[in-house]
Amino acid sequence: MKNILTLLSFMYLSTLVFGQAPNYDDLKILYADANYEKLAKVAVGYTEKDKTKKHVPPYIWLAKGLHKISMSGNPDPKFKNAFKDAIKYLGKGMKIDLKYNDGATLEEHREFIDKFQLNLFEVIDNEMSSGNVKRAYSWAIKYQKITTNLVGVKFIMGACKFEDADKPTARTLWQEGNKMMDEITSIEGFSEADRKMLKNGILASAKSMIKGRQNDKARALLNKAAQWFEEDEDWQQRYDEAVN
């Protein structure tokens, strides 16, 4: 009897996770109609229901709606954190999809995910360019939720921590980034934002290392990544400035 109950329980859970999902045409129509506020309301309902909370599409459509709201300048206080909430729900959707579907659902929304990553990269880049390393670090933590290529963001975070006078954490993040780089043979599968994150993270980290009189480590890091940016004029210029 115990074995039968265990089997039935497993079958029930499998049905929730792998069972036939709704096609979510209602969400698609709301998005097509630019009714983003209602889309957010309906989609979040799906993410809270037992039968659909492990289905990926509601999270993706919710993130799409919230992203549009964040870009529109909607004054409604309930959407004041729309951009951050979009990151949260996209991250949850990606996590579920990678766990149960090997990322298959995400590929259907690749164009949106790539664009969203670029938006967040630009936020991080602007904060770093302005010297707001604390804010850049905070956004970089969020970027980790919406990518499967963490190497670039590790170096971004390391540079932020160094500039924020937290050298022990910077070293730890750089070590993690270096370990990831050792396992990378190509960045062909990286999104545009992931490639930019890697490039800026390496250059920013090398600059911080040189500031900390770790010139040899900076050169080694730059040389390790140089193969991926040989045709990038901006990389070459900044690489030459750092090395020389």
Image (cartoon, rainbow, N blue to C red):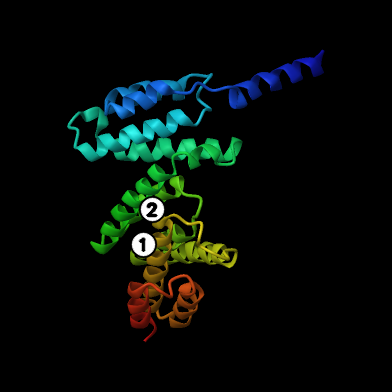
- Measured as percent of width and height from the top left, residue 71 is found at 24, 40
Q: Is residue 196 above or below residue 31?
A: below
Q: Earlier in the sequence, mark 1 or mark 2?
A: 2
- Measured as percent of width and height from the top left, residue 211 is found at 36, 77
Q: Dot 2: what SS?
A: helix
Query: Can residue 81 be seen at all in this image of the molecule?
Result: no
Is 24 positioned to the left or the right of 79 in the image? right
Is 16 positioned to the left or the right of 128 in the image? right
Q: Amino acid at mark 1?
A: Cys
How busy is the neighbourhood of tag 1: few (under 14 within 10 Å), some, or many (20 plus)? many
Q: CA distance from mark 1 to mark 2?
A: 9 Å
Q: Nearer the viewer, residue 150 or 162?
A: 150
Query: Can residue 8 be seen at all in this image of the molecule?
Result: yes
Q: Identify the residue at image location x=42%, y=34%.
A: 60
Q: Is residue 93 above or below residue 200?
A: above
Q: Identify the residue at image location x=44%, y=77%.
A: 218
Q: Amino acid at mark 2?
A: Ala
Which residue is situated farthest in the top direction here?
1
Q: Dot 1: what SS?
A: helix
Q: Nearer the viewer, mark 1 or mark 2?
A: 2
- Measured as percent of width and height from the top left, residue 33 is found at 28, 26
Rendered image quadrant of residue 124 = bottom left
Pointers 1 and 2 in contact (CB under 8 A)? yes
Is 10 positioned to the left or the right of 243 in the image? right
User: Which residue is identified by label 1?
Assistant: 160
How busy is the neighbourhood of tag 2: few (under 14 within 10 Å), some, or many (20 plus)? many
Is 1 positioned to the left or the right of 206 in the image? right
- Measured as percent of width and height from the top left, residue 154 is found at 46, 59
User: Which residue is identified by label 2?
Assistant: 140
Rendered image quadrant of residue 59 = top left
Q: Is residue 25 above or below residue 140?
A: above
Q: Is residue 52 above or below residue 222?
A: above
